[in-house]
Amino acid sequence: MLKQRAYNFNAGPAALPLAVLEKAQKEFVDFQGTGMSVMELSHRSATYEDVHNQAIARLKSLLSIPDQYEVLFLQGGASLQFSMIPMNFLSSGRQAGYIMTGSWSEKAFEEATLFGEPYHVASTKENHYRSIPELNKLKYNKNDAYIHVTSNNTIYGTQWKTFPQTGDVPLIADMSSDILSRPIDVNQFGLIYAGAQKNLGPAGVTVVIIRKDMLEKANTAIPTMLQYSTHAEKNSLYHTPPTFGIYMLGEVLAWIEEQGGIDAITKRNEGKAKIIYDTIDQSNGFYIGHAEKDSRSLMNITFRLQNEELEKEFLTKAKEEGFVGLNGHRSVGGCRASTYNAVPFEACTALCHFMIDFQRKHG
């Protein structure tokens, strides 16, 4: 008898669809009659390559990725991409623009300083990253190697609603925490990267979507494993990939298809976020949202209570009621509900009821 599953609001690794977990459990020991787990298959086998290629095809279909892009499955998380991007595209003496919207853009910027001359196109640090910079105030150079943005900010709970138009300067986006949560125009980007552990699957896989002309101008005087072209030329099979993670990613993509695709997922994500934000906004200041309303994330809902003692009580009681992962990031404190694709609507409704009841008892 399955114990009732937790209300999982972890920021990452995050909730996975129950149907995907159950299918993986069923296939765990014997995958497609091979007498082996998918984790035991050779990555050179036809059975695994079919899993691999299906995952790529599903991602291309769901995101409408044009033919002039490659889909890569890498390792090292978004954190390695912070280094790989400038290593491949930012040489000494060249500039790249970084739009600063939180801790992850800060980390990406710091890595870029090792290879060239990154600069801040814009920053909202002065208002504690409560908002996204205004598009009409972005100033960058036409000769920049690239412009870097973080599409969604897990720690502060902000999200780009519209991306900057950068013309001939490649736009690079870290979409780790909101990829496949809403439609995007892939054509607008030179490169998109995302750790899988929030919306795509388990930790261990990093998706890179890269325009082919970016591959042609990338630096080749760097280690082979850190060149995007190495992985593009070998279909991400240059070395042993994280096979089980890619299998799970493919199953999550199949689940998204079964839900009705990105349009259906978007509507559900909007509904989940709305009921929690409405609870915050209607609390008469008992709950205090961090992000400004026009910058609010659909994926990470950040809020405070009136004092730290009340927050501790809230988090303690929430844990007792089966809510997991509601603590804010250790660097900022407070509370955070991460409502990624696989978080069910019922979990968000239960959280709203808990928040209302807690306010009634402590307000």
Image (tube, grey):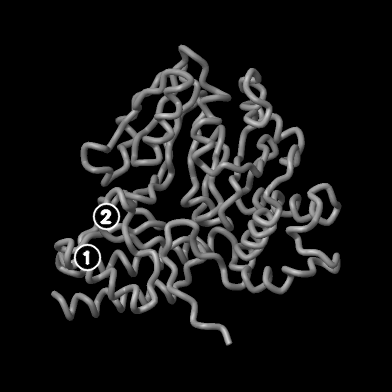
SS label for mark 2: loop
Where's residue 202, x and y in %?
A: 58, 57
Q: Earlier in the sequence, mark 2 or mark 1?
A: 1
Q: Is residue 83 left or right of residue 209?
A: left
Label at residue 180: none
| Snapshot quadrant of residue 88 | top right
**Residue pointed to by mark 1:** 311
Q: Amino acid at mark 1?
A: Glu
Q: Amino acid at mark 2?
A: Gly
**Residue pointed to by mark 2:** 333
| Snapshot quadrant of residue 19 | bottom right
Rendered view: 310 above or below 360: above
SS label for mark 1: helix
Rendered view: 45 above or below 119: below
Q: Residue at x 41, y 25 (%)?
A: 97
Where's residue 292, x and y in %?
A: 25, 51
Q: Residue at x 38, y 72 (%)?
A: 323
- Kindly check if marks 2 and 1 are in contact, taking CB atoms under 8 A apart as contact: yes
| Image quadrant in which the C terminus is located | bottom left
Where's residue 200, x and y in %?
A: 57, 55
Q: Is residue 264 left or right of residue 163?
A: right
Q: Is residue 130 left or right of residue 31?
A: left
- Count residues near mark 2 (Cα–Cα under 10 Å), then give few for <14, some for 14-19, many for 20+: some
Say which of 131 and 321 sits in front. 321
